[in-house]
Image (cartoon, helix red, strand yellow):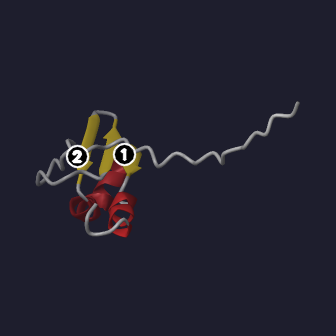
Amino acid sequence: MTVDSVIEPVSQPENTWVLTGLDRCDSCGAQAYIRVTGVTGSLDFCGHHYTKYQEKLSAFAFETIDERERLIENKSKGDDY
C-alpha cells in the first residue's frame, strides 16, 4: 500500500513589527514608525520628525527601530488596505 503525500510549500512569515498603531510620535502624535532608545529611555517618532531630528538623535541613540518600510508595504497592498 502506498500513501500519496503532498508537500505544501512553507510560506515565509510576514514582517514582525514592533511598533503598533497605538505608538505615537512624541513630537506631534501621528503614528510612530521609528523608536529611538537611549540610556535614559526611548522616544517614538513619525517619519517626518525622525528625519528632522535624526542628526541630534544619533548622539543619543544606541538602538533605532526604523519601520518606515511599512508605509511602502501598505501602499503596495492597494487603496483598500
Q: Quadrant of the C terminus?
A: bottom left
The extreme left residue here reads 28
**Is residue 29 positioned above or below 62 on the image?**
below
Whether residues under marks 1 and 2 lie with C-beta atoms below 8 angstroms apart, the answer is no
28 or 63, nearer to the observer: 28
Q: Which badge, 1 or 2, comes first in the chain's sequence?
A: 2
Mark 1 residue type: Ala
**Position of residue 66 measured from the top left corner of the image (x, y, whole percent):** 38, 53
Q: 15 left or right of 18?
A: right
**Circle 2: is it few (<14), some (14-19), or many (20+) Cα within 10 Å?**
few
Q: Residue at x 39, y 45 (%)?
A: 17
**Position of residue 9 measured from the top left corner of the image (x, y, whole percent):** 66, 48
**Circle 1: is it few (<14), some (14-19), or many (20+) Cα within 10 Å?**
some
Q: 72 left or right of 5?
A: left
Q: Residue at x 20, y 42 (%)?
A: 22
Image quadrant assignment for residue 70:
bottom left
**Position of residue 67 measured from the top left corner of the image (x, y, whole percent):** 37, 53
Image quadrant assignment for residue 2:
top right
Q: Residue at x 25, y 43 (%)?
A: 43
Please name the residue that numbered disc 1 is placed on: 61
Inter-mark Cα distance, 1 to 2 = 23 Å
Image quadrant assignment for residue 80:
bottom left
Q: Nearer the viewer, mark 1 or mark 2?
A: 2
Q: Secondary structure at mark 1?
A: strand
Numbered label attached to residue 38: none
**Is residue 23 positioned above or below 46 on the image?**
above
Q: 74 left or right of 5?
A: left
Please name the residue that numbered disc 2 is placed on: 21
40 or 33, nearer to the observer: 33
**Position of residue 42 measured from the top left corner of the image (x, y, whole percent):** 28, 38
